Image: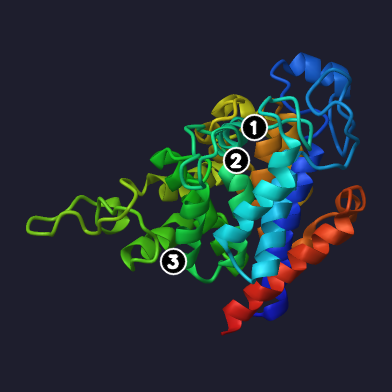
């Protein structure tokens, strides 16, 4: 039986975990030389920090959100106001609340830095006057995940609606089909965690069951348990929008490695060296999955190891924060991370409004 308060706790924990992960990496963002990171912030970053002069996000203060966190908040506001995902409402918020503050350059705009996909959309939307639906670019990063994770939470018990809404929102700014499929896969995984599942070696089987039932739009290229098709079996077992289900299989393989005592990454922040420090989605997702599987019950360890790994640690911490926040719930996030987050009260109120809608779905 679904417990209303448990679902609400996990849903709010996922959203607040993402906000916290984003803000924790604001100061030490994008250090690709780990010796420089340690020089500026010491051997271990354990909380919110100011950005150093002349670096990314210069001028912002510890506990504030980057532009990724600001856009996530726009999404959460839209979900609350529309009682679900309304693409027109979300696009209007970008047009009215974000784009007037940008000029198309990286080091400008709220949050101190504007990502490639948002800059591309701004140029096509504002300078060229193109309509939404024709402004997406080819950035291979996690920017769509960073905002659609709230959609995943909202539709945690409605996988078909989740997949459609996340795919539609992703292509507003990122049109590469592999990026879209990996973004939908992350959302589907996060939804299962909000439901109460664990990020473990069995989670991909549950995701593939949703493919076989038609709830997730992935192409199923093998039969059960990844066995090859049998003679006479229709090929493929299930055709879907996305060419491969591999994005759904990754979490279990990573979780299996995280639980294997013979496969150790020590210290765990070196996950960034194993899977890669850059921004691309194929570097970020395995690292976030690893940390969230290894520290499923320890939000602090998951996000701080994400931050201390350097490179694109903001996305890594934001994604790990959402996944781990969903597993520990809002009640499992240390109070100091909430206390030090700017506007935490307002962010939490909106997160809990989304969470209340999720619980209504769970019990309907």
Q: Position of residue 244 (x, y in %)?
A: 33, 46
Compare marks 3 and 1 and give the one earlier in the sequence.
1
In the picture, the disc for residue 123 is none
Residue 327, compared with residue 104, is above or below; it is: below
Compare marks 3 and 2 and give the one earlier in the sequence.
2
Q: Which residue is mark 2?
A: 143
Question: Foreground: 139 or 233?
Answer: 139
Crowding near pointer 1: few (<14 within 10 Å), some, many (20+)? some
* Kind of element beneath mark 2: helix
Q: Nearer the viewer, mark 1 or mark 2?
A: 1
* Kind of element beneath mark 3: helix
Q: Which residue is mark 3?
A: 160
Q: Residue at x 73, y 21 (%)?
A: 31
Relative placement, left or right, of 56 versus 269 is right
Crowding near pointer 2: few (<14 within 10 Å), some, many (20+)? many
Question: Foreground: 221 or 293?
Answer: 221
Q: How is the image coloured?
A: rainbow
Q: Which residue is mark 1?
A: 115
Residues at badges 3 and 1 in contact (C-beta under 8 Å)? no
């Amino acid at each position: 039986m679904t417990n209303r308060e448990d679902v609400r706790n996990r849903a709010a924990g996922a959203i607040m975990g993402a906000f916290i992960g984003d803000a924790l990496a604001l100061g030490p963002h994008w250090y690709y030389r780990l010796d420089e990171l340690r020089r500026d912030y010491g051997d271990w970053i354990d909380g919110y920090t100011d950005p150093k002069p002349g670096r990314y996000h210069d001028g912002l203060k510890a506990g504030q959100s980057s532009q990724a966190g600001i856009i996530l908040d726009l999404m959460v506001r839209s979900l609350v106001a529309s009682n679900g995902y309304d693409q027109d409402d979300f696009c209007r918020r970008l047009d009215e609340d974000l784009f007037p503050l940008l000029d198309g350059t990286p080091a400008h705009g709220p949050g101190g830095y504007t990502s490639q996909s948002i800059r591309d959309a701004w140029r096509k939307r504002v300078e060229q006057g193109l309509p939404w639906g024709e402004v997406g670019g080819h950035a291979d990063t996690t920017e769509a995940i960073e905002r659609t994770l709230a959609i995943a939470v909202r539709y945690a018990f409605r996988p078909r609606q989740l997949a459609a809404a996340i795919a539609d929102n992703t292509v507003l700014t990122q049109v590469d089909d592999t990026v879209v499929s990996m973004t939908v896969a992350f959302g589907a995984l996060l939804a299962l965690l909000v439901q109460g599942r664990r990020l473990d070696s069995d989670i991909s089987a549950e995701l593939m069951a949703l493919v076989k039932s038609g709830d997730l739009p992935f192409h199923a290229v093998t039969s059960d348990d990844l066995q090859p098709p049998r003679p006479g079996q229709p090929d493929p077992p299930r055709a879907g929008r996305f060419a491969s289900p591999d994005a759904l299989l990754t979490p279990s393989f990573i979780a299996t490695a995280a639980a294997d005592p013979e496969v150790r990454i020590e210290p765990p922040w070196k996950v960034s060296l194993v899977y890669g420090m850059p921004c691309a989605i194929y570097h970020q997702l395995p690292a976030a999955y690893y940390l969230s599987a290894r520290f499923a019950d320890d939000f602090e360890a998951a996000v701080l190891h994400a931050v201390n790994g350097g490179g694109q640690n903001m996305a890594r911490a934001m994604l790990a924060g959402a996944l781990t926040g969903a597993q520990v719930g809002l009640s499992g996030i240390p109070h100091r991370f909430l206390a030090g987050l700017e506007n935490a009260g307002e962010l939490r109120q909106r997160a809990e409004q989304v969470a209340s809608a999720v619980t209504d779905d769970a019990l309907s």
